[in-house]
Image (cartoon, helix red, strand yellow):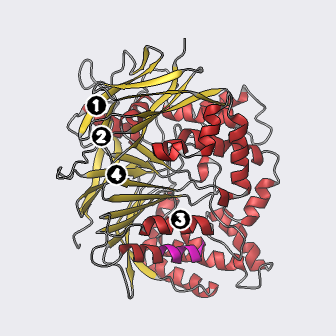
Amino acid sequence: MTGLRLGPLLRYVDHSSGTTATIWVEADRPCTVAVRCQDGASGTSPTFAVAGHHYALVVVGGLTPGTTTPYEVLIGDRSVWPPADSPFPPSTITAPATADGAPRAPLRVAFGSCRWAAPPGGGSPFSPGSPLRPPGDDPVGPDALDALATRLASDPTAARPDVLLLLGDQVYADETSGATQRWIARRRDLREPPGPEVADYEEYTHLYDESWRDPEVRWLLSTVPSCMIFDDHDVVDDWNTSESWQTDMRATSWWHERIVSGLMSYWVYQHLGNLSPAELEADPLYAEIRSAADGTEALRRFAAAADADPSGVRWSYRRDFGRVRVLVVDSRAARVLGEQQRAMLDPGEARWVREAALDAPGSYDHLLIGTSLPWLLPPLIHDAEAWDAALCRGVRGGPDGRWARFGEKLRRAADLEHWAAFPDSFRELADLVREAGGGPGGPATVCVLSGDVHHAYVAEPRWATGGPEARVFQLTCSPVHNSIPALMRVGFRFGWSRAGTWLGSLLARHGRTAEPPVRWRRTGGPWFGNQLMTLTLTGRSARLDLVRARKAGKAGRSRKSGPPTDGVRLDTIMERSLTEEL
């Protein structure tokens, strides 16, 4: 009997018509998947096959704008979601109101990054199909997505995000759990490279199983729309740090299969759901794979070509939520790594981002630029990365000198590969933000949303002259579920201090680096822990909240047949307006 292996995930919800959504599923056999809503909206799709797995992305049409409707997933005439014994409320689709004159509802964008399904090398905090795990056995603390699911499931009045933006490291291909390592060991010898890390597509599918079968997360992703982009750990730590790094990786016996499988699995599990139904309809690869009996080779060719020539593929995308524009930028695969031409984005990608940001000026009140890596870092770290990039470029002793060799070693050891390590790209993003912020009639805010650095903070840039009218913020939030060593916490705090800023200026002088086009100050944080930020955007006003996952005492259920409380809660750490002066 055909069943649902993974999902459903509610992905795209159309904010233009309010009538369409997409739902992603993985079935355990070929079949036709249907989604049926209580209000009569529906959609069906046959599965497509990749490497022995069967997926469907169902376009649901006929939603009623301004309503929330429960839905079920069927295979044939049999309902496979929600489970009959589910302790959670029904999964729903909320269609935004779009009629002229309708009240403009707040748009809530929750975001974060870096989520271990289970700490690497240790026992998994859950096993697929097992009862809910007890609290208190997680060495890195409660998962913020679990805590968000708990809040929404147990309190029907809680404010629900309109979209969950996951900014990278959805899975950790290079830091697998003990349970995953034991599963891999049944397939191959862990003494052979890449050891306990993920080696191929099948092992990637296991990572997504481990991550998305968590009962709370599975329910959450079935009822809150999500947008996603990869970061390094979705493939390997410090992916595409430098040309030298790439050369060394390509010389290994295992890298080609890892990168091809990583891009294949990302396309299936994450990228497809970022696209609108119109974009899906126009995608020739999607059409080819859906029409084939087995799409494995077509997808493999695509992924190999994407690795060989990143400029031929665009992973970045744009979403418009009424008068809020969201640009999610690929800051990993699109890099130009030649030491004398380093860029975070290849020319075509940079041009697309610029055009998407500046399209139809005056048509949006808020511009959100999602990039996994922060644009504005603590000043010491920014200057250290710019200094290191200058050394690697040969500003001291030439590109083959000892300073350049030292710079490359330091870059890899200290993860010096954020926007600051691509100085031209840093300045180009600053110029784009300034131009997009515009003058009167432009957006009220321009916010760069990022993760990666395992803490949260708010930074505000200032231009010496010609700054935008809009309020501009760097909003950084991670991890969702991970850890940070105590020494790194000290380092990040020091990076914002006067002493750290002074030390950074010495590095900048030694590296002969150009003065950055903006200066910035920290206006919130740093905050540490498993956390999520939420932007609430209403008209031209913007409010920011930061919540942190905490243990909440004995696990149980909120009522006899109600949703699990699971011993976790979300505490509000910070809330502030972004559109009122401090």
Q: Secondary structure at mark 2?
A: strand
Query: What residue sits 52% from the left and 35% below the top?
Result: 211
Q: Position of residue 159 (x, y in %)?
A: 24, 43
Residue denoted by label 2: 95
Q: Secondary structure at mark 3?
A: helix
Kind of residue indicated by mark 2: Ala
Kind of residue indicated by mark 4: Val
Query: Mark 1 or mark 4, which is nearer to you?
Result: 1
**Label 4 Cα neighbours within 10 Å, binned few <14 / some 14-19 / many ≥20:** many
Q: Outermost residue, top direction?
A: 1
| Rendered image quadrant of residue 320 | bottom left
- Whichever of labels 4 and 2 marks the residue nearer the N terminus, that label is 2
Question: How far is the residue under mark 2 from the one under mark 3?
Answer: 29 Å
Residue denoted by label 3: 352
What span is in magenta? 422-430
User: Is residue 5 located in the magenta-colored stretch of the structure?
Assistant: no
- Of 226 and 566, which appears nearest the observer? 226
- Whichever of labels 1 and 2 marks the residue nearer the N terminus, that label is 1
Whether label 2 touches label 3, CB < 8 Å: no
Whether label 1 touches label 4, CB < 8 Å: no
Please, what is the dominant secondary structure of the magenta stretch?
helix
Marking on residue 69: 1
| Rendered image quadrant of residue 565 | top left
Q: Secondary structure at mark 1?
A: strand
Query: Is residue 48 visible in the rendered structure shown here?
Result: yes
Q: Is 574 placed left or right of 102 in the picture?
A: right
Whether label 4 touches label 2, CB < 8 Å: no
Q: Quadrant of the C terminus?
A: bottom left
Residue denoted by label 4: 109
- Whichever of labels 1 and 4 marks the residue nearer the N terminus, that label is 1
User: Is residue 429 located in the magenta-colored stretch of the structure?
Assistant: yes
Kind of residue indicated by mark 1: Thr
